[in-house]
Image (cartoon, coloured by chain):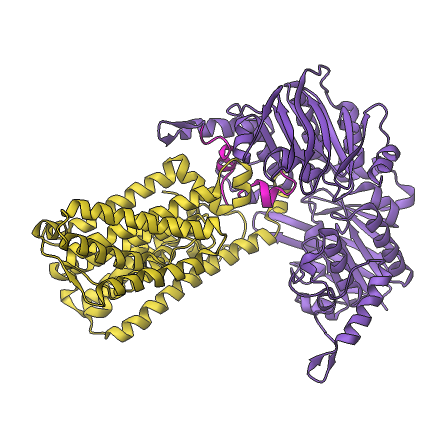
Chain colours: A purple, B yellow
Amino acid sequence: MPNYVEFNKISKGFPGVQALDDVSFRVQGGRICALMGENGAGKSTMLKILSGDYQADEGTIIIDGMPASYHSPHGALKASISVIYQERQLVPGLSVMENIFIEDLPKKGIRIDKAALRKMTQHILDEFELDVNPSEPVGRLSVAHQQMIEIMKAYRRDSEIIAFDEPTAPLSESEINTLFKVIRRLKEAGKVIIYVSHRMSEIFQISDDIVVLKDGKLVCELNADETTEQELITAMVGRDIGDTYAELCRNENIGEVMLEVRNLETDDVHDINLEVRAGEIVGFAGLIGAGRTELARAIFAADPISSGEIFLNGQKVNFKSPKDAIAAGMALCPEDRKEQGLVLDRTINNNITSAVLEKVKTGLFLDKKKERKLSHAAVEKYSIKTPSIEKKVVELSGGNQQKVILGRWTSEAMVTKVLILDEPTKGIDVGAKAEIYQAICDFAKAGLAVIFISSELTEVINLADRIIVMAQGRITGSLSRQEATEEKVLKLAMHH
Amino acid sequence: MENSSKEKKVHGTQSLGSYILNHKVTLLIVVTIVVIVFFRLMNPNYLGWQNVLILLTITSFVGLLGLGVGLLLISGQIDLSTGAIAVMAAVLVAMLISSGIPWPIAALITILFGAAAGGITAILVNGLGMMSFIATIGMMSVWGGLALVLTRGNPVTINNPGFWAIADIRFFQSIPLLFIIMLFFVALYGFILSQTRFGRSVYIVGGNPTAARLAGINPKKIQSILFINSGAISAFCGVLFASNFRRGDPVAITLGMDAVTAAVLGGISFSGGAGGTGGFLVGLLLLNFFNNGLMMIGIGPYWQTIARGAILIAALMLDFFRERQRAKALRAGAAEIAAAKSQ
């Protein structure tokens, strides 16, 4: 059993950038080490070197005094190292038990020993307090349950060194608690645990040590008990960003009702009644799967509505597709910007104008000059960091990608009146988050009705003028910013 | 011309391999020239006007079909039935003319048939949600079979000098009007792709249909239009084919497969969202100069069939490698790298 893992002077370069530069730190067995840093700090690269996906240019990983000598993910597994990535690597058509034991299914002769497999799987499921049938195909499970299965896959290998890359992103509160119980048990068993997350509160809840990276360099090693959140943020950002929310320049003038939803019913949400005023930011809080995304998609006509009415600016509307909704002044920044928001392989320019092609044409043809003008304006307005608007979106950081989508919906060619932002700060670093918060306040100032969906409670409570809480497809409460506290919102979110 | 492959990339290893993949069109032009020089050395008649006439005529047919498929590939779909629609159209136009209908009207009816055939595919794919790969294999069989049924397997001869004349017009002895028509369509489609809203939508739909829909573009509509277009241009190709051979021959030909090969060889990706008509034209010329060269140095037709398959597989491999490299760049956390770079 290893007592520690040491990263010794690790460097890794990619063309044009030094992702890791002479980074050394040690993770002790029986302690949980959080790896922190903004996007681009080098956390993922470090995990990929640990997992054998990448080879370090210089430096070694030392396990218990011995330099590790593996050069592939397979070799890392053999060295008892498991890295659990955000991207799930499950086979949707195979059952839960087959997925968990995919690398070495128990055999009886040449046949798979299903009875033994089921027993072993049930044992793990019990440990994780997860109530699913071992024979259920994984593809039919919720995203959260799939994530738990992915974690179990690594767990049952009984690796000595386990790294988690944002494991809680799709999980609800209770699942997170179960996961933490499991992680603590691993810790007590003396395993080496590395934990990467963007969620501050989690870090302080679970970790013992904190290693902060910035721009590929080690900034500092902290003891979690002796560090405040503000100190950690300062270390990550490299400067004191102060109280982000207090510095925001907010909108004071809330106008008439812009969006009204009455008795809306879909397959996923029920009995929805709400109003959003011009210049108002309405936050939507709730647990994963509470129906917030589904509600946004229904309002935007991306999913069908069974019954109910939607009024825009007092006029009843009946959108048949997102196209109609856009034409009427609705805009949606979807939850998953890479899968649903952007065409990664196209340029910034193409992505910004994709919703307004009708407006940038003269006669039959696209007016490329006008297109470029719109894109340049967006790049300038949101200070998107790029050398050119002809750069492919895939080459941008998460924060800049999100700004491209904001640029699309707020260009002067749009008539946006209602802006729906679904998890706009997900996976974005602290500095870019602050910029996006200010952008949201600016939308409100410009008279837009803003719907702001976020799973980060602090964010919703501090940014929104009013917070609507959802649970199980229904609205369970509405709070003003003054009355909202994390406790109150959570209570409503867990309302049954 | 949209040519994303020419953009310099900041990520990925700058090896010789990636250089070649990023400069695919240049590479194709070089290969084409090598192929031409090689076959010219092997057989002096290769570039004689008689052979060039035959070569450019076949190229025109493959090119017209390839444009239909190519646009669909960019939008993320495929049409394998173009060759069969062309055969059916050749038979149909021959039968209509034989029954006394003036040839321009017969041609128009045939093109409308092609559009309708594309419409059926569109319903199968976008209405019923079938995979276009499977649906168009089915339609290929249906139209090829129907042509055989209608003619009982015998060619329908056309006795109409006015209709023959279309394919007989040529410039400088060896450049047929057909080739000019094909070039016209390459230019037209190239223009549509790069300069119009519709063209841009084709790329966006092919690149990410979900994002396209949420940006107010209707992927099904775009793809349906392209299926109808593919059917219509295939039928148009069939009409020209009938004019050239002065008959409607129901025996299936391999033009449909060549069309797909030309498109993929020319850099139109199988996974959608990338490629353009410039690359397509080079791929088309390379393929046809090569196929014709094999014939001119006396390689038998059976071996030529094998060579056809080999080229298709080679083209797909090239496409596959480029895609894999792109996926690698994505996985390598290109975003992370860019972020670190800009800070």
Residue nearer the viewer, B333 or A166: A166
Q: From where the camera sits, is residue A240 visible? A: no
Residue nearer the viewer, A372 or B136: B136
Q: Please name the residue shown 42% across and 47% down the image.
A: B6
Residue nearer the viewer, A151 or A241: A151
Please state the horizontal and vertical placement of residue A387, each as a whole percent of the image: 53, 36
Q: Please name the residue shown 69% across and 42% down the image.
A: A268
Q: From where the camera sits, is residue A404 visible? A: yes
Tell me which corner region of the image, top left, top right, bottom left or bottom right, holds residue A315.
top right
Q: Please name the residue shown 43% across and 60% down the image.
A: B318
Task: Look at the picture and state if A465 lies above or below B294.
Answer: above
Q: Quadrant of the N terminus of chain A?
A: bottom right
Task: Look at the picture and state if A145 lies above or below A63.
Answer: above
Please count the marks in the image.
0
> Left of A430 or right of it: where is B195?
left
Residue nearer the viewer, A464 or B214: B214
- The residue at the far bottom in this view is A109
Please state the horizontal and vertical placement of residue A332, each as a whole percent of the image: 61, 34
Q: Quadrant of the C terminus of chain A?
A: top right
Please state the horizontal and vertical placement of residue B8, each as a whole percent of the image: 47, 46
Q: Please name the residue shown 40% across and 61% down the image.
A: B138
> Left of A80 or right of it: where is A185?
right
- The residue at the far left in this view is B161
Please state the horizontal and vertical placement of residue B173, each as a whole percent of the image: 9, 53
B169 in magenta? no
> Left of A256 or right of it: where is B71?
left
Q: Which residues are magenta?
A: A334-358
